[in-house]
Image (spheres, rainbow, N blue to C red):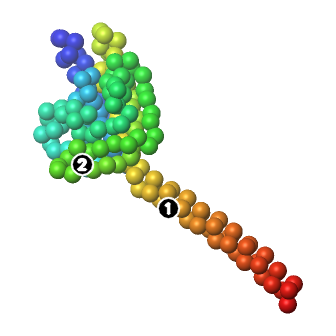
């Protein structure tokens, strides 16, 4: 059996062994093969990336589905697959290149190399698990909270100024 078929079989075996965990995750989860092709995606990932069944059958490249700012110089997922080392980035600006108006979002992304059963002769992983969490809404809530906190501080400062003016006016009366 060729190295490619052995890695493919090992990856399929590994997916089968953890499928209930992957399916039940609320985060978007994808399993990619050693070439960054999407081998499996849970419903949250399919929804986020707008994946069709044909995309999974053809093992569409992960980087063709989402553009991550952290991958501008070198694809972090490919680095993980080549090195076998996990990675984590929070709040990465990203773009979903779907349709005429690509969607902009911020994501937290995690990547974990899969070395189940065997490794490539080149030393890299047989695949990897990539999780995405769309944090765009969280960022908006945080921004609104900080704006509100700033407005409260300004209000409190104005109230203090009015109290001082009121005290001055009472002394003059």
Counting from the top left corner in percent of width and height, residue 157 is at 69, 68
> Is any atom of residue 108 visible in this view?
no
Q: Earlier in the sequence, mark 2 or mark 1?
A: 2
- Which mark, by number, is residue 17? none
Q: Residues within 10 Å of mark 1 (few under 14, many from 20)?
A: few
Q: Mark 1 falls on what kind of element?
A: helix
Work out which residue is located at the far bottom of the displayed protein and give it.
173
Please report the residue visible at 24 percent of the width from the left and 23 percent of the height from the top: 35
Residue drawn at 41 percent across, 35 percent down: 110
Closest to the observer, 136 or 114? 136
Q: Image quadrant for the C terminus?
A: bottom right
Is mark 2 in CB contact (under 8 Å) with mark 1?
Answer: no
Q: Is residue 56 found left or right of 134 in the rendered image? A: left
Mark 2 to mark 1 CA distance (whole Å):
25 Å
Q: Residue at x 26, y 34 (%)?
A: 63
* Label disc, if present, on residue 144 of the rendered structure: 1
Q: Where is residue 46 drawn, in percent x and y? A: 24, 46
Residue 113 point in image, percent of width and height: 37, 25
**Residue identified by numbered label 2:** 102
Dot 2 alpha-carbon crowd within 10 angstroms: few under 14, some 14 to 19, many 20 or more: few
Residue at 27% across, 50% down: 103
């Amino acid at each position: 059996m060729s190295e490619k078929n052995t890695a493919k079989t090992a990856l399929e075996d590994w997916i089968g062994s953890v499928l209930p965990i992957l399916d039940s995750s609320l985060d978007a989860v994808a399993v990619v093969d050693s070439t960054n092709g999407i081998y499996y995606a849970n419903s949250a990932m399919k929804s986020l990336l707008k994946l069709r069944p044909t995309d999974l059958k053809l093992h569409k490249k992960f980087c063709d589905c989402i553009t991550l700012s952290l991958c501008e110089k070198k694809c972090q997922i490919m680095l993980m697959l080549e090195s076998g080392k996990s990675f984590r980035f929070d709040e990465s600006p990203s773009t979903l290149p779907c349709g005429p108006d690509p969607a902009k979002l911020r994501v937290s992304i995690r990547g974990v190399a899969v070395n189940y059963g065997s490794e490539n002769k080149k030393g890299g992983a047989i695949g990897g698990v990539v999780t995405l969490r769309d944090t765009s809404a969280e960022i908006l809530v945080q921004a609104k909270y900080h704006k509100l906190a700033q407005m409260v501080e300004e209000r409190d400062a104005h109230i203090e100024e009015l109290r001082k003016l009121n005290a001055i006016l009472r002394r003059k009366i």
